[in-house]
Amino acid sequence: MAVLRMTSSLRNRISFFALIVLFFAAGEAKTLCAAITRWPSQYLHGVAPDIQNTRTAAKTRELGFDDFVVMHSGVTMSPLWSAEHLTRVNLLSAKGLERHNTFHHEDQLPASERAELKDYAKSGFDRGHMAPNADMPTESAQQQCFSLANMIPQDSDNNRHLWAAIESSVRSMVKNSGDLYVISGPLYLSKTIRRLNGRVFVPTNMYKIVYDPRMKRGAAYFVNNEQGDEWQVLSISELEKLAGINFFPNLSLAAKQSKLVLPEPSQHNEHY
């Protein structure tokens, strides 16, 4: 498949987005939601991200699954992030599994805070995975990743092309690195927010952070939630400013500003 490209227009929009009032980065960045987790294996050094403002922290619940962790927002009715520790061994196991589209609401969440299948029905948006099915090494983990707690309303072209190519590129990186820590999630960089069925927030953007513990550096893919092949690579520090989340509390600012080289998104014939 042809390599997808980064254009300058998306880079220009980053500066604009940083200036507007953000739902997820609004308010004072003084109150921290402590980085305490019951599922440390999915996070770098076992430390979960810190949420840096009270608006973002409202109605959040951490949900642990076999091979990924979700920080769920009962406000947006979708994940703030899904975190995975990807290993070559797990991806080898994942390649042998047949996909089963077992989309379902999340029973761990109260009905008032969770998305339902009917919210997405005839919406025109895909139910976009944050922790992708192709990463899951067992049938149990695969079934869990189809929880709507792991989904966002995603532009169908984006989900099936650019975002799928990013996911594939990250898995190919694991082939060389052996393991990566990955955090994926949505952002709401607009003064107005669309909702599915008056309930589920539609993000303007998505990110996928990739941290290589061997190289001791990371970076993030950043894309618009729309059709097209535009993408950007941000440093962890740049993304944290947009998101209002300290994704790696135990990393220095210098480490967060140093970018890992991320490959251009493309669909790979993934062999591990």
Image (cartoon, rainbow, N blue to C red):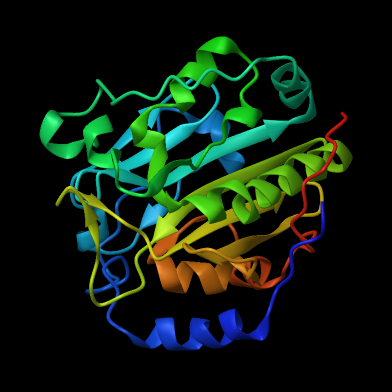
Asked whether the viewer can see residue 107, the reply is yes
Nearest the camera: 62 or 170? 170
- Quadrant where the C terminus is found in the figure: top right
Residue in view at x 55 percent, y 65 percent: 223
Percent of width and height locating residue 32: 30, 58
Q: Is residue 167 left or right of residue 111?
A: right
Residue in view at x 65 percent, y 19 percent: 137
> How many callouts does the rendering have?
0
Q: Quadrant of residue 20?
A: bottom left
- Residue 170 position (above or below residue 189): above
Percent of width and height locating residue 92: 78, 21
- Residue 69 position (above or below residue 53): above
Residue in view at x 17 percent, y 38 percent: 113
Q: Is residue 127 left or right of residue 136?
A: left
Q: Is residue 4 left or right of residue 105?
A: right
- Residue 73 position (above or below residue 158): above
Nearest the camera: 170 or 5? 5
Percent of width and height locating residue 130: 49, 42
Residue in view at x 64 percent, y 29 percent: 134
Asked whether the viewer can see residue 250, the reply is no
Nearest the camera: 133 or 35? 133
Which residue in the rendered view is the most extreme toward the left? 112
Nearest the camera: 122 or 101? 122
Q: Quadrant of residue 253?
A: bottom right
Percent of width and height locating residue 193: 24, 66
